[in-house]
Image (cartoon, rainbow, N blue to C red):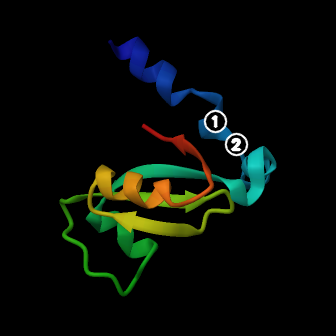
Amino acid sequence: MQHDRQTQSDHPLRHLTAAQFMALGGDAVVYVKQVKGDSLGSILPDGDFAANEDFHVVVSADGSPLMIGDSQEAVVEWLQGQTLGVVTLH
C-alpha cells in the first residue's frame, strides 16, 4: 500500500511548472484540489472558512482560483456549465 501512495505522489503531472501546465491547454484546463479551510486563507484572505472542513478548489492553469465549493457535488455542478478540461489531484 505504501508503494501505491508513493507512486501516486510521484506522478509527472505533480511536478509541472506553471508554464508547462499552461502549455497543456492554457485557459481550457483546470485542476480540482481538495483542501482544508485553514489553507484557504492564502487564496482568499478575507474568507471565513472553518479550519477543519474540506473544500474543493477549481484552479485555472495559471494558478488562479476560479471556484471554491464546500462539496465535490458543488464543483461538478459548476463544471457542467463550463467548457473546461479537468485534471483532478488526489
Q: Position of residue 33 (x, y in %)?
A: 44, 50
- Residue 2 in the image: state x and y as whole percent: 35, 15
Residue at position x 36%, y 87% in the image: 46
Whole-number angstrom distance, CA of label 1 to CA of label 2: 6 Å
Residue 85 in the figure: left or right of residue 35:
right
Q: Which amino acid type is shown beneath numbered disc 1?
A: Leu
Q: Residue furthest front?
A: 81
Query: The C terminus is located in which quarter?
Result: top left
Relative to residue 29, is residue 64 depicted above or below?
below
Q: Neighbour class for label 2 at 10 Å: few (<14), some, many (≥20)?
A: few
- Counting the numbered discs, the total is 2
For the residues bearing labels 1 and 2, Cβ distance under 8 angstroms: yes
Disc 2 element = loop
In this orientation, which residue lies closer to the viewer: 52 or 29? 29
The residue depicted at 48 percent of the width and 41 percent of the height is 89
Nearer to me, 18 or 22 = 22
Q: Could you say where residue 23 lies in the image, as x and y percent from the top left? A: 81, 48
**What is the number of the mark on residue 16?**
2
Locate residue 24: give its quadrant.
top right
Q: Residue furthest bottom?
A: 46
Task: Give left or right: position of 60 versus 8.
Answer: right
The kind of secondary structure element at disc 1 is: helix
Q: Amino acid at mark 2?
A: Leu
Q: Quadrant of residue 59?
A: bottom right
| Vertical relation: 85 (above or below) 61 | above
User: Quarter of the image containing the N terminus?
Assistant: top left
Which residue occupies 52% across, 68% down? Answer: 66
Picture disc at residue 21 = none
The residue under label 1 is: 13
